[in-house]
Amino acid sequence: MIKIENVTKIYKDHDEDIIAIDNISLEFENTGLVVIVGSSGCGKSTLLNILATLDMPNEGNIYIDDVNISKCSKKTLSKIRKSKISTVFQENNLLDNFSVKDNIYIIKNTEIIDDIEKLQIAGLLDKKASKISGGEAQRCAIARCLSKDTQYIFADEPTGSVDQENANIIFQMLKEISLNKLVIVVTHDIESANLYGDRIIELECGKVINDKVISNKNKETNNVNNNNENKISFLSRIRFCIKSLLSKTFLLVLSTIFIVSAIMGINLFYELFTMDNCTIVLNECYDKSQSYLLYSNRTSLPDEEVYDSITI
Ligand code: ADP
Ligand code: MG
């Protein structure tokens, strides 16, 4: 979990104070795609850098998994950055003099072969980083994040210098990553923000002016499922239930035995409490194959003395 409390960042430009972040408090869960939007110069990059521990605020606290990084030592901070944080920037993402492979495998991880295929960079691995396009470099930077395998990923305008096709690949990949990790992206691409974001934070002049959680995507999906469920006809449901029951033969046999036993039990109790002496004797007579006389109306069977008279 990442939390910032009353964070303010002021840059000094000659004698002028520029308030880039003005008393912002935010909290982020461990997963999801959070998108930060706003006009140029409103403080998006500054906020992202502070969240990614690359920059320190003038005021306020930053907590990464409950560690107040504003107060921890350089060594601890470096450890946190290495183990928990990876970044994708708009430019200068890769070390130019190294191959793509070396850039991606800086933190050795061979388990990302599938992701390399998905990002369509398998053919670039042996190329020098300086010889690939901006879009390719962005996808390589995402592969590097995956390779580093940290809980928190920060991306500052990762689609800023790429075409729509590459932008879609990048956002789709970030979305996929965000199922298990927290991905915070700064972007100008409002359409993608709405399409992929789980939460959209809007900044203006260093302040949060809007912070909305886009939960209706899931709700919509659920509604679609619910509607489909409602559309299943009653007959189909019965058929489905029978089919499902038949497929569970053991359960069927067991429940049949249970139902039969229950009926027999109820019958037994009924007989036990309602059977009068007369009936008991008559039954006894039956058992002993004795001859007897029976009054037609069993409900008004006579007293004990009469029994003697009706049995031979
Ligand atoms: P955004 O990413 O939304 O475009 P930034 O966070 O980069 O905005 O910048 C916010 C404000 O802080 C801007 O007015 C910018 O000019 C100023 N700023 C950013 N970095 C510096 C810096 N290193 N020195 C002075 N002013 C800066
Ligand atoms: Mg910026």
Image (cartoon, grey):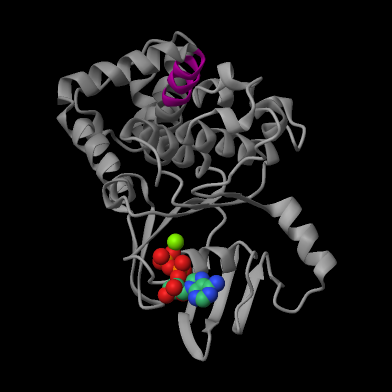
Q: Is residue 243 visible?
A: yes
Q: Which residues are magenta?
A: 250-259
Dominant secondary structure of the residues highlighted in magenta in the image: helix
- In the depicted view, which residue is nearer to us: 144 or 214? 144
Location of residue 306 in the rendering, given as x and y in whole percent from the top left corner: 33, 31
Quadrant position of the C terminus in the picture? top left
Q: Is residue 293 visible?
A: no
Q: Is residue 161 magenta?
A: no
Determine the residue positioned at 35% across, 65% down.
40
Q: Quadrant of residue 241?
A: top left
Taking the image as shown, residue 2 lies to the left or right of residue 222, namely: right
Residue that sits furthest to the front in the current view = 14
Location of residue 97 in the rendering, given as x and y in whole percent from the top left corner: 70, 34
Determine the residue positioned at 52% across, 34% down.
139
Residue that sits furthest to the right in the current view = 75
Quadrant position of the N terminus in the picture? bottom right
Determine the residue positioned at 51% across, 14% down.
250
Q: Is residue 220 above or below residue 243?
A: below
Residue that sits furthest to the bottom in the current view = 15
Taking the image as shown, residue 58 lies to the left or right of residue 263, namely: right
Q: Is residue 10 above or below residue 235?
A: below
